[in-house]
Amino acid sequence: MRRGQSASDTLDRKGVLKLLQAAREIDKEFVEIGDRLVPEAGAHLRESDLINLILDDLPYPIARQEVQKQKAFVGRLTDLLPTLLRYFKFQSVDHVVGALLFIDDCFYRFPQIKSAPRRDRALREAIQATERAEKIVGEAITALAALPSAVSVDFQKFFDAYVEAKNKKNSRVIDKGQGTRSSSRIPNQNNAR
C-alpha cells in the first residue's frame, strides 16, 4: 500500500486474491497444474487441496465445489478486508499477509471444529465408558467368585485355554523384547483362604 492511499483504494477482488495467494505460499507449478485440471483451482484452492487434486484424491465435482466456496470467501474478504485494514493500521504488506493467513486458517478449519465434539464432552464420554466397563468387569469377577470351586476349576481350565489361544493369536503384535506374561488366574474364594 502506498502512502496516501486507503486500503479500499488498493484492494479489489484481484488484489485480495493476490494477497491470499501470498499468504498461502503455494508452489507455482501446483497452481498451473491445478488450473489445467479445474478452471480457477490454482487461484483459489489451498495447497493441500491442489495436491489432492493433482494426485486424483480430490474428485472433480468436489474440487469445483471447493473453488466456488473459496470464490465466495474471497468475495466476502474483499468486502471486509479494507475495513479491517483501516482498523488495525498494519505497517507493512507482510503484516497484512500474516493476518490473512490467520483468517484463511480460521475459515478453512471452522467446519472441522464446528462438527467435532467439544473436548470436555469427549473426555466426559470416555470417562463414562471406562466406568461402565469397570462396573461390568467387577460384576463378572463377583459372579465368577460366587461359583462353586468345582465349576471354578473347570472354568479356569477353559479360561486358561482361551487366554493361551488369544496370546498365540496376538503374539505377532507383541514386542519380542518383552518377555513378560501377565497372570490369567481368576480370583477364587477358595484360593483366597
Image: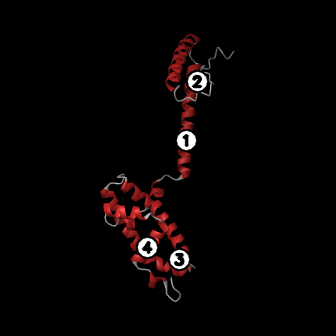
Per the image, the residue denoted by label 3 is: 93
Res. 142 mark: 2
Dot in front, 1 or 4: 4
| Residue 183 in picture, x, y percent from top left | 62, 22
Question: What is the three-letter code of the residue carrying label 4?
Answer: Lys
Classify 122 as above or below 75: above
Q: Residue at x 67, y 17 (%)?
A: 192
Classify 95 as above or below 183: below
Q: Is residue 183 left or right of residue 155?
A: right
Tell me the distance, in whole angstroms, between the alpha carbons under discs 2 and 3.
70 Å
Question: What is the three-letter code of the residue carrying label 3?
Answer: Val
| Residue 160 in picture, x, y percent from top left | 55, 17
Disc on the earlier residue, 4 or 2: 4
Compare residues 84 and 39 and report the one nearer the observer.
39
Disc on the earlier residue, 2 or 3: 3
Tags 2 and 3 touching, CB below 8 Å: no
At mark 3, the secondary structure is helix
Tell me the distance, in whole angstroms, between the alpha carbons under discs 1 and 4.
50 Å
> Farthest right residue?
193
Tell me the distance, in whole angstroms, between the alpha carbons under discs 3 and 4.
12 Å
Disc on the earlier residue, 1 or 2: 1
Q: Classify 10 Å Cα crowding around label 4: few (below 14), some (14-19), many (20 and above).
A: some
Compare residues 126 and 91 and report the one nearer the observer.
91
At mark 4, the secondary structure is helix
Per the image, the residue denoted by label 4 is: 18
Q: Is residue 103 shown to the viewer in this render?
A: no
Tags 1 and 4 touching, CB below 8 Å: no
Dot in front, 1 or 3: 3
- State which quadrant residue 182 falls in: top right
